[in-house]
Image (tube, rainbow, N blue to C red):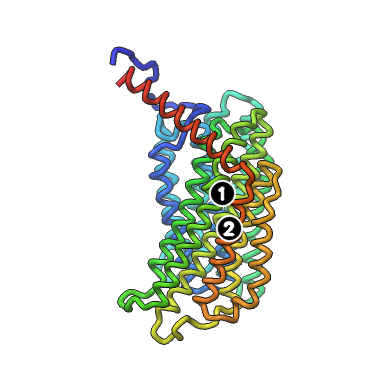
Amino acid sequence: MAHRSVARWSWGLRAAAPGSRTTRLELFYDLVFVFAFLSVTTLTASELTPVNLYRFVLVLALLWWSWTGFVRMGNACRADQGSLPLVGFVTVAATFLLVLSAPSAFNDRPGGLPGPLVFAGCYFVIRMAQLTVFGRVDRTDPVRRWRFLLRLTVPTVATVLLVLAGAVRTHLPDGRLTVVLQLTLWTLAVLIEYVVGTTVAWRWWVVTSAGHWAERHALMVLVALGESIIALGLGPKTGLPLTGPVAVAALIGILIVATLWWAYFDTLAFALEQALHHARDRAARLRLARSVYTFLHLPMVTGTILYALGLKDLLAEVADDRTPTWGWALGGFWGGVLFGGVALYLLSIAACWWLAEREVHRPLLVTVAVLAAVSPLAFRVPEVGALALLAVVTAGGVGWETRSEDGKRHRVRQLALEEQLASEAEQSRWRREHL
């Protein structure tokens, strides 16, 4: 208690440190993104068509880019210090309104605010709030200050494209051409953010804390897996009795979610963070953070949510008393969503292993190939049977992956445990001296 801390609170931005971790305030901010993913998933499940599925991917891509910008902001500055919490609250409010406007983002609904304009405006506010922080950080560097002005044009152009996409449905007659034109404008907006944003905005960025960056993305994977758990609970209609097929389908669904969790969190999450720590060179660390986390975690999250979409529809049909005991035949479209989501998740994990460790994990690739091979059969059998087949292939493949790691798993997990114990010991020492 006799030691006085040299750190003093102020309204200024406080730079993050290499050992910074996720703050409680950032976890609070993530709640609105949990709501965003859940709302977009529920909205898509209510009327799932190929066009709506593509719209879902576009909205998810913009949400992911907004969230990634917020993570970068928290990696550069301490999210719970100075004026940054105010920027975070603005981001949360704008994201919440953006999600509320998502049902009318592509097609305005009469009787309310113009949905496409509200969506585009909220997205613009989110991105500008983030760029304001980066501009404040870069204000002392003339080169970065000039490049910051260039970075401002990226979300501006993307927002203009979103506004034009909304105007297409208002001023042109409904039809296939109108839908294609609107989706093209949305696709261009997403591509501009991702392609130009990563070449211009990331050029001067430094991953200050590898631990913070890895932890934030791992938590978002956990949120996506939680979507599947929620889908299990919301799939069956309320008021219907719990039948044997519903109970079996729910247990199988939980088994698949647990398997997906194991595939990422048992070893890969630790290995990726350790690789990011090991990358001492700024450019090498940046490439790893961008390719493995920003780019590859997006299809990982997308695959998990696609699985949740398929699972929710399957449970709803199995619980319906008008459905045969073990469900209707799964069908090609819903089967593609269900099996494709799991395959996309596993492919993303295999790609992460390759980019981070230069390791080819054949069990994961074989599992994806087997899923593709058995899909035609699975699409013709009752839904619960197809779900059981998906569980057998997925659990078998991930189990094979775990057994074939040849000591890698033990080394990675042992290193992570030693780091955790050392960190806990250092925290305990500091608390004994200062608290």
Q: Which residue is mark 2?
A: 162
Is 363 located above or below residue 431 in the figure? below
25, 221: nearer the viewer: 221
Q: Which residue is mark 1?
A: 65
Name the amino acid type tagged 2: Leu
CB-based contact (under 8 Å), mark 2 and mark 1: no
Q: Quadrant of residue 247?
A: bottom left
In the displayed orientation, state which residue is furthest to the top. Answer: 2
Residue name at image x 56 percent, y 40 percent: 410
Residue name at image x 69 percent, y 54 percent: 362
Is 257 located above or below residue 53 in the figure? above
| Neighbours of disc 1 within 10 Å: few (<14), some (14-19), many (20+) | many
**What x and y, as percent, mark residue 37?**
47, 58
**What x and y, as percent, mark residue 32?**
41, 51
336, 80: nearer the viewer: 336
Residue name at image x 34 percent, y 76 percent: 242
Asked whether the viewer can see residue 108, the reply is: no
Asked whether the viewer can see residue 119, the reply is: yes
**What x and y, as percent, mark residue 382?**
53, 80
Where does the N terminus fall, quadrant-wise? top left
Name the amino acid type tagged 1: Trp
> In this image, 186 relative to 232: left or right?
right
333, 15: nearer the viewer: 333
Where does the C terminus fall, quadrant-wise? top left
Q: Earlier in the sequence, mark 2 or mark 1?
A: 1
